[in-house]
Amino acid sequence: MSALTAAVRRPSRTRGFREFLGRFGGRSDGIVGVAILAVFAILALAPALFVGPLENAVTASGSPLDPPSAAHLLGTDELGRDLLNMTVHGARISMTIGLLATLITVVVGVGIGIMSGFLGGRWDAFLMWLTDVFLVLPNLVLAIALAPILLSLVGDEAEIFGIKAKLIVIVIVIGLTSWATTARIIRSQVLSLKERAFVDRARVIGTGSGRIMRRHILPNIINLIVAQAVLTFAYAVFTETSLSFIGLGDPFSPSWGQILNAAQEAGAPGLLAWWYIAPPAVCVVLVVVAFTLVGNALDDVLNPKSGARR
Amino acid sequence: MNGRYLVNKLARAFLTIVAIMLLNFLLFRAMPGSSVRLTHSPYQTQEQIDQQAHKLGLDQPLLPDQLVTYIRQTLSGELGDSFKFKGQPVTQVIGDRLGPTLLLIGLGEVIAIVLGLALGAYSGWRRGSAVDRIGGGIGLILYSMPYFVIGMPLIVIFAAALGWFPTSGMLTAGVVYDSWTDQLFDFLRHLVLPLATVSLGLIGGYSILMRAAIAETRAEDYVTTARAKGLTDGRILRTHAFPNAMLPMVTIIAINLGYVVGGAITAEIVFNWPGIGTLTVDALSARDYPVLQGIFLMLAVAVVLANLVADLVYGLLDPRVRS
């Protein structure tokens, strides 16, 4: 029987996907966003292929604060490091932190949203109160208060999968402080799903709550989750940049925010060193705009009804 | 506004503040190197360490004794002493920096709300017009820029290259002013770029949200009715669409406040503006936890109260809630 349903289902899925591609292809803003992201994804996957290994104070290839020239297309920083080199490597660090933070945010937000909406009653009241608290709290300030605690828990020098502790802390902090919006949106969708007949049917044949949430509710909100995850990615890159700029980043893994932090510390704005600021700043804005464009386009295409929200 | 709505909102704000105080209590206990651990030195005898712990009340059980003491102290405005500024109470350290931040964020919010809502309303009403297309693009880009990404280029262009405005600070250091007008002028010159940064950073978000809110009202029956009555387009926008779109905006502006306050930290750093933002970062790098905790508590409670006010204003404005 399962083979039969699979055989019946498969063509409809491919058709659904083709239809989706067709509709998404009609959104020029979404296509522009995907194109921008593709470029940055390639840079992030193999930065050394384009600009060689990441330069440090010892291997710096230029003299301090050189404006752009043929040898250094984007100029150099106060240590003589090539800014093109740093910015391309920064893509990898910023995007990795953004991706991991997005995963945490979506998992926590979706989990709390589904439980809150499906279980209802006291659980709903408690979880939504928690969500309200996190929605209202000044995220950046909470992040600043949380970061030293987490860092002492993880240990300054620790590495997890080759990622430095400081960056892990940034990932967790972003995840912990930004799930509330996702939880709210997921919950409202689950509230309406739960009234549908197929959930009643599953319940009548004795399916447990956990299984209903996993097998019946979750697949029906995948579209919403995908769109929400893409928008969260924009927020995560934005927040990472801010946290690194404040000084919570790792100087040895220069993300774009970290480069801007170094530029600020070196007094680049007052020294007219625009080439120190422009590359990382333009990259951040491009990536955040691209994720927002793709996320909005996905949301409109995948969740036609939610279009009214925007 | 009916009583139940009022009680509901008050209870909600109260519960949130309780949660914030609990969080603050736990954070403060979990801080690395806080209290006893920070002042602990290898030359102290165990007896001295115990004495110190007793003085700070840390030999009491965490629950409920320490929590009760903490709540009592917090409610009486006792937030402890700063580590960095020796002996100064946290409330005083924070109080000294409050004025510049309130001024910067307050003015920035007002400018951004007026311009952002106007731009958003026009774009939403005339969807697809030149203003909508160009304004929408600029709005999205501004919305995607952290404050410091806006501020740094402003310094490069208007301070370093053109020399129109100073690069940092709130007043020129070491200057004796002839009159208060000179001082005011100097202050205003310093204010222009940070204020422009905060306003630009906020305009994007407000215009995007307002555009959506106005666009939604276009399909409403009362707009069709107004049109059928023969009202002019501008009049419908001003007297029918705009007030209705403003309703959700009141809530959104209040919810955004926490985000605005956090973001202003980075704007202050770029311009070395002597407010809460620079204080936060100084406290972070000096591991001045009492000050950090104090800032967190103050900002969080302020945002909750602002949300409460927004809810109450909403209740007064919206007849559906009022009745």
Image (tube, coloured by chain):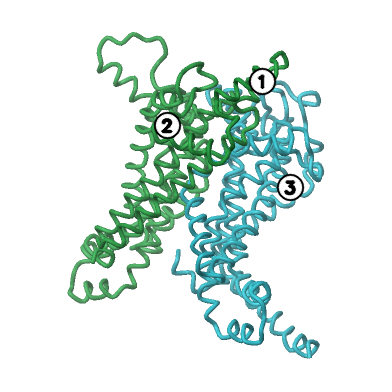
Chain colours: A cyan, B green
Give the residue at mark 2. B194
What is the distance, in whole Å, between disc 3 and disc 2 at their CAs? Answer: 34 Å
Q: Is residue A264 above or below residue B235?
A: above
Q: Secondary structure at mark 1?
A: loop
Task: Give me the residue at 71% from left, 23% from top.
Answer: A79
Whether callout 1 and callout 3 share a subunit is answered no
Q: Is residue B105 above or below residue B9?
A: above
Q: Type of residue at label 1?
A: His
Q: Is residue B187 above or below residue A5?
A: above
Task: Give me the residue at 55% from left, 58% from top.
Answer: A293
The percent position of residue A92, horizontal first and vertical second, equals 73, 45
Q: Type of residue at label 3?
A: Leu
Whether callout 2 and callout 1 share a subunit is answered yes
User: Which one is in front, A225 or B229?
Assistant: A225
Binning the other alpha carbons within 10 Å of mark 3 as few (below 14), some (14 to 19) or many (20 upward) gives: many
Chain designation of label 2: B
The percent position of residue B274, horizontal first and vertical second, equals 44, 24
Q: Quadrant of residue A202?
A: bottom right
User: Which one is in front, A232 or B13?
Assistant: B13
Can residue B76 be seen at all in this image of the molecule?
yes
Give the residue at mark 3. A43
Q: Secondary structure at mark 3?
A: helix
Q: Earlier in the sequence, mark 2 or mark 1?
A: 1
- Disc assigned to residue A102: none
- Disc assigned to residue B40: 1
Binning the other alpha carbons within 10 Å of mark 2 as few (below 14), some (14 to 19) or many (20 upward) gives: many
What is the distance, in whole Å, between disc 2 and disc 1 at their CAs? Answer: 42 Å
User: Which one is in front, B135 or A264?
Assistant: A264
Chain designation of label 3: A
Q: Quadrant of the C terminus of chain A?
A: bottom left
Label 1 or label 3, whichever lies nearer to me, is: 1
Can residue A141 be seen at all in this image of the molecule?
no
